[in-house]
């Protein structure tokens, strides 16, 4: 069966520090991968999605970037965090674009 | 751009009461999906509806897809405290196919 791993679960980082969040999927090949951000009590904002290795689409201009160095690995990064980067970051995968999405446990990021 | 709207944003009910959340898309959807996010948790896929007018049930949950495939609803009969959470609808965007999520309806159930 397929599983998605996302870590860390919680992170507190100072303003200006770098960020690296990692997500891996097991049990499937060539998944579509997504990074979402959820502000407290709000909906899901799609940040990046990827249909294959090295293929990244950005949804909104921001202080973040994403990379997909391997088929089942998706990384969210920042060179310098801002206070506004705080939030709940969720990685997800789907078989094809637009089909049911399976979410990781999420990373709660607080920038201080 | 294409939007998926959900109402209400919040709903407080007494345990045993019914609950309904509504989802409306600005464009026709090829399918509609529903997710549940428990407090502090991550969204979990509940169901997908594909056909116009489709109705599906999962125990006390009833999901409907409108005839025009632009709206959907989730109805919970006799809510329980385990139903607490935020319910999201989502549909594929017409241009790119990426899932567009509604803002969610947060359900609180008073015991």
Image (tube, rainbow, N blue to C red):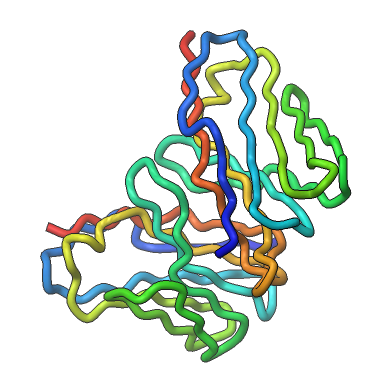
Relative to A47, A15 lies left or right: left
Relative to B42, A22 lies left or right: left
Answer above or below: position of A48 versus B57.
below
Query: Residue placed at 50% from the left, 81% from the top?
Result: A57
Q: Judge by depth and name the residue closer to the eye, B16 or A12.
A: B16
Query: Residue placed at 53% from the left, 18% from the top?
Result: B81
Q: Judge by depth and name the residue closer to the eye, A5 or B23.
A: B23
Query: Residue placed at 44% from the left, 69% from the top?
Result: A47
Q: How many labels does the image show?
A: 0
**Residue B72, position in %: x, y?**
72, 40
**Residue A109, position in %: x, y?**
27, 57
Among the 4 quarters of the image, the one containing residue A87: bottom left
Among the 4 quarters of the image, the one containing residue B1: bottom right
**Residue B29, position in %: x, y?**
74, 56
Answer above or below: position of A102 versus B53.
below
**Residue B5, position in %: x, y?**
56, 45
Answer above or below: position of B36 versus B3.
above
Answer above or below: position of B60 versus B70.
above
Q: Judge by depth and name the residue closer to the eye, A95 or B48.
A: B48
Query: Residue placed at 64% from the left, 25% from the top?
Result: B20
Picture quarter with the N terminus of chain A: bottom right
Q: Judge by depth and name the residue closer to the eye, A104 or B98.
A: B98
Picture quarter with the C terminus of chain A: bottom left
Relative to A16, B5 lies left or right: right
């Amino acid at each position: 069966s397929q599983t998605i791993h996302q870590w860390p679960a919680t992170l507190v980082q100072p303003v200006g520090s770098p960020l690296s969040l990692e997500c891996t999927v097991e049990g499937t090949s060539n998944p579509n991968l997504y990074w979402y951000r959820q502000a407290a009590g709000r909906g899901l904002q799609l940040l990046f999605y990827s249909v294959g290795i090295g293929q990244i689409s950005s949804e909104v201009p921001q202080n973040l970037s994403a990379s997909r160095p391997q088929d089942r690995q998706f990384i969210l990064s920042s060179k310098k965090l801002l206070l506004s980067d705080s939030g709940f970051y969720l990685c997800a995968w789907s078989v094809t674009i637009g089909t049911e999405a399976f979410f990781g446990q999420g990373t709660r990021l607080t920038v201080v | 751009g294409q939007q998926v709207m959900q109402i209400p944003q919040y709903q407080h009910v007494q345990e045993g009461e019914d609950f309904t959340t509504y989802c409306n898309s600005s464009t026709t959807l090829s399918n509609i999906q529903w997710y549940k996010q428990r407090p502090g948790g991550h969204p979990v896929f509940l169901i997908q509806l594909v056909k116009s007018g489709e109705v599906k049930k999962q125990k006390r949950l009833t999901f409907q897809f409108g005839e025009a495939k632009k709206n959907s609803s989730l109805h919970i009969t006799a809510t329980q405290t385990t139903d607490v959470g935020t319910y999201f609808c989502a549909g594929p965007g017409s241009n790119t196919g990426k899932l567009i999520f509604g803002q969610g309806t947060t359900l609180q159930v008073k015991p």
